Amino acid sequence: MRRPRGAVNLVNLTLTVAVLSGGYLAWLCVPLWLDDLDVREALAAGAGQLTSENLGMDPAAIQKTVALRLAHVGYHWEEQEGKQVQVPGLGLEPDDVKLERGADGKSGRLSVDYGRTVKLQPLERYWTLNFHTSREATVRP
């Protein structure tokens, strides 16, 4: 038995909505994920500078170096004159980069917690995704 002309197939409609929604979420989240890979790279560079306590860079210098590399990654939103404005960088300070040394003195961990806000285009609303990125390293003698 044939359907009347102009009838909507519910399965096709559901699949179309699912594919479009998945594409929209990918359009929003893939750039954030790629920026998180850049954050991981910056933390790896900072972890490579970890040395013993007596040699090399002090923890504050490592935190500053990582924060400077992250100043050119992605964007964040700030309120200026009552409007939300997109500003380059993640808006992280050196204090946001956490450096922990292991109790044995032979390991260390750099981590950063940050939130990324995206603008949902047709709705003019904002959605925040939280990220926690860390990198462990063995301290060089």
Image (cartoon, rainbow, N blue to C red):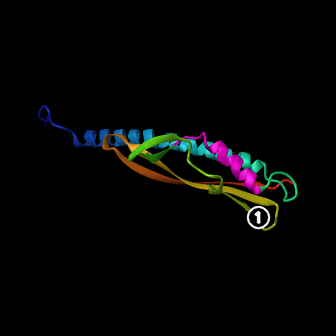
Residue at position x 73%, y 55% in the image: 60
From the viewer's perspective, is 64 left or right of 30? right
Viewed as shown, does residue 4 lie left or right of 24? left
Q: Position of residue 28 (x, y in %)?
A: 44, 42
The residue positioned 38% from the left and 47% from the top of the image is 82
Of 53 and 8, which appears nearest the observer?
Answer: 53
Q: Which residues are magenta?
A: 59-75
User: In this view, which residue lies farthest toward the front?
Assistant: 81
Dot 1: within a 10 Å radius of its alpha carbon, few (fewer than 14), some, or many (20 or more) residues? some
Question: Horizontal placement of 23 versus 59: left or right?
Answer: left
Q: Looking at the picture, how far across and down is residue 91, in whole percent?
A: 56, 48
Among all residues in the image, which is located at the extreme top?
A: 5
Residue plotted at (47% across, 47% down): 78
* Magenta run includes residue 123: no
Quarter of the image where the N terminus is located: top left
The C terminus - image quarter: bottom right
Quarter of the image for residue 37 reads top right
Q: Residue 14 at what x, y percent from top left?
A: 28, 43
Name, please, the residue furthest toward the bottom.
103
Coordinates of residue 88 in the picture (x, y in percent): 54, 39
Q: Main secondary structure of the magenta part?
A: helix
Does 64 appear in magenta?
A: yes
* Front residue of this view, candidates 30 and 22: 30
Residue at image coords 27%, 39%: 12
In the picture of the structure, the residue carrying the numbered disc 1 is 102
Instruction: Tell me the SS state at disc 1.
Output: loop
Query: Three-letter amino acid code at disc 1?
Result: Gly
